[in-house]
Amino acid sequence: MSSKVLNISYIEKEKELIQFWKYNNIFEKSVEQRPKNNPYIFYDGPPFATGLPHYGHILSFVTKDVFPRYWTMKNHRCERRWGWDCHGLPIESICERELNLKQKNEIYEMGIADFNEFCRSKVLWYTTEWKKTVERMGKWIEFDNSYKTMDNTYMETVWYIFKKIYTKGFVYRGKKILFYCPRCETPLSNFEISMDNSYKDISEHSITAKFKLIEEPMTFFLAWTTTPWTLIGNVALAVDSERDYVKIKFDDEYLILIKNQLDTIKKDYEIVDEFKGNDLINKEYEPLYHISPDTTKKGHFVIDGGDEVLSDEGTGIIHIAIYGEFDYEMIKKHDLTIIQHIDEHGNLAQGPRDWIGLWFKDVNEKVLEDLHQRNLLFSSEDYTHSYPFCYRCDTPLIYNALDAWFIDIQRIKPMLLETNERINWYPKEISRRYESIVNTAPDWCISRNRFWATAMPIWECEECKKIKVIGSIKELQENAVEEVPDDLDLHRHIVDKIYLKCSNCSKVMKRVPEVFDCWLESGSMPYAAKHYPFENVEWFKHNFPSDFVSEYVPQVRAWFYYMHAIAVLLFNEIPFKNVVVNGNILAEDGTKMSKSKRNFPDPNLMIEKYGADALRIYLLSSQLMRAQDLNFKEEIVKQVYRRFNLLLINVLKFYSLNDIDNVIMDITRSDNILDKWIVSLLNSLIQDITQLMDDYDTAEVSRLFFNFIEDLSTWYIKNSRNRFKSENINEKLSAMNTLSYILYNLSKLLAPLTPFISEIIYQKLIEKGIANFKSVHLEFWPEFDEKLIDSEVLKNMELTREVVKRSLELRENSKIPVRQVLNKVTIKGVNLEKKYLDVIAEAINVRNVNIEKGEEVEFLVELDTIITPELKLEGIARNLIRHLNNYRKKLNLSTKNRINLYLKTNDKDISEALEKHKEKIKKMIQAETIIQNMEGKEHIKKFKIENKVVEAYIEVK
């Protein structure tokens, strides 16, 4: 580790520290040195490695890094292991594009085995880039020994979990209305669609169609729809039996609709009858399209849809087809015919002959034209609505009645809600949102009609349809017709070749074709990552549930929900105790970040420009940590860098330049009020931050850090500078001891949030013999000392600072710079001891501070702004000291470096000030001599005082 911490750029120092930690195995030691019997369990949710890390990932890195570091410093053993999500549509979609496969049947033509192996080869394509970004952001985790959802050990546990749930009676096969992607040819869950915000606002034709009553001539039901293509499969019309409906005369026809939607009729009409919806039940009408002999035979009738029939939109009459959840419930309830006129590719399979094979969205225009020609179109208009798209291939989805495998969530909802009371959500209001998610959750569709995922371990007899569920490779070996190897790959293309013998009829049992929903896999992570229960049974007993998980808001209804559901299904237990939920990072204009739009700065460039710590503290201090969205702004990152990193670097530079022997962290010997104040403030900070970190509140922690660093830099150090340069060694030593104490504890407080700057500070303390560990990240969390928190000192210093603030405002109003000494300031309405008045005098640069006491006197500050010739010269001397100390600073001189100063000026006032205040100037700039002669000197420093040129040259002794 280089001792010249401050002689290279901060960004380069961060990079150097990464190598330092690696070379010295600091992460490994930080875990190994904590007791095994005091664990802090952390689950790191598995991302996909199918693209480069973005800001959302970086936020996740940071949040998941902070708290394991914190609890490690509190003497907990926190093992951290990376994981990869390897299966499902995300990787399949990428592979299909690379292989130029347009439809699912092309995968069958290629061969499932070849396709799956291609997927396997692409899953971890970007792992090198991920590792680089993870390390660069300072996240510590066991990366190389990561778990993968495609590993056999992982998949075997998924089999075990599924069989447990199946054996308990929570799994069933049934037909339900599900989101269906006609391109991927697989069902998708509501959670998947809503999690990835896959809805888009689109404009399409909405139409109001006319359905002719059989028993009444020239009379029509009006039904409104935004999906004209579904009219081909109409099987019924639904009304609300308890609402008021009307029959109106419109031109030469009679139309029926709900009464409160009459204002949508734009032309003149006449109401000829009013009645309840109940009077319409069982009335027969003529369908728009005759495509099913069964429905033609049975007829088309009006049914009671209850209050699900909306009265504030459309006509109060709903056309029923299979492609909707409400529709399907009505079809089942009334034993209606199921017509699925759209095939698995999203094309029309039944209907007008000339339309067969059309994409379902293209059928809309055909229906519109056809109904218009047949005078069955009452109206059409453009309608903008939110429509779901496949989150991977961007294909419009449809609701479809599909056979699938489900977990019965309804039966476990009471237990989910009950156990949720034991989960601590941060922020707390997420708990109520989660309850709502549970209350409205449908049964979980766990099957997918795809390829690259864990094969469902369900075998079905071809003859008697008996079902056999397998829970392990060993069980499969015991039941398979042929020999099964121990290292069997549990992917579909391998397992499909294994047959069982039916115990019921002795016929062949084949595996069902479906694979698992990848959320069942990721929700199994607490067990599958450890190959439980095939291994680590004893470990699991003492390390479940986890203490901490964290992800962004959409994962509340995804990973968190699925983990919770599985834990309840298996053990009636919670899977985690504390959940930190982050918001979403958006582009600066509030839109979604988009690579194609290039509406956000490259994350790697941000890190190179401002460093990882600045980006970390920017994210951790933002509303993201309140589960609110953040518009990413580089300007704020820059401000954070200046307010946080640069201030700390300047504090450390000041500390480094004030070199003195025998520095220790003894704060008991100092009676200086600034020392007592900063020590009180620090211990109060330790107390507050410890509580906030226990409550997982980094936003408030960050705010306190910003305030403290500003107090340290712009108040304590600024008003203590003379003590650090004092000729009195005891005064100088007490100041250095205090600052050492502050920096030592501050470095430990900062370590979880900003691992780089905290290490830079700590390494400087090692150089001075203050710190003893190899790294700050091997340290223990500081404890506050209540005896060192003096509330009276804190209160009086706040008052002192208010006096200084008002005095400086008076200076600014009078346009008198602070370096110009003034005679006095008078303070009314306060009572401060002399030690505080001395601080005021130094801070605002006045000779005298007068107090006017009185109980009824209003708090007031009056500044004497008259500048006498004597005061003017003293002000010039102060200005000289400021310029010359800046000169020393640029030469990287410490307080041990004594100098000879060569000075030249032609200004009378400057010369007089130099002569009159020579001793003070020498003392303040650590000069042995001041020589007013520049003969033979090169590399002269020039500066101006009151627009008069001064030349200076420093000779280091």
Image (cartoon, rainbow, N blue to C red):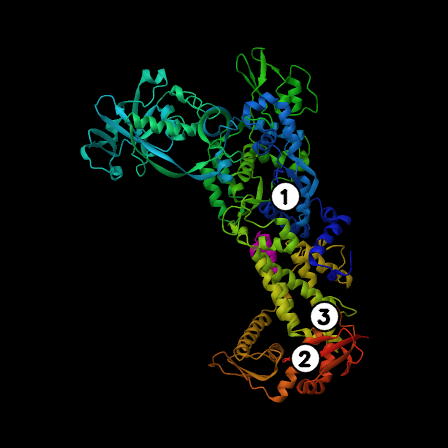
Distance of label 1 from label 3 (alpha carbons):
46 Å
Residue 636: x, y in percent? 56, 57
Callout 3, which amino acid? Lys
Residue 179: x, y in percent? 47, 31
Callout 1, which amino acid? Phe
The answer to which of 121 and 57 lies nearer the viewer is 121
Which residue sits furthest right? 957
The secondary structure that dominates the magenta segment is helix
Per the rendered image, the range of residues in magenta is 687-701
Q: Which residue is mark 1?
A: 42
Q: Secondary structure at mark 1?
A: loop
Circle 1 or circle 3, nearest the eye:
3
Circle 1 or circle 2, nearest the eye:
2
Q: Quadrant of the N terminus?
A: bottom right
Image-quadrant location for residue 479: top right
Residue 590: x, y in percent? 49, 50
Precedes in sequence: disc 2 or disc 3: 3
Left or right relative to 91: residue 251: left
Q: Which residue is mark 2?
A: 949
Distance of label 1 from label 2 (alpha carbons):
64 Å
Precedes in sequence: disc 1 or disc 3: 1
Q: Which residue is mark 3?
A: 889
Callout 2, which amino acid? Val
Q: Is residue 530 above or below residue 32?
A: above
Distance of label 2 from label 3 (alpha carbons):
20 Å
Q: Is residue 691 magenta?
A: yes
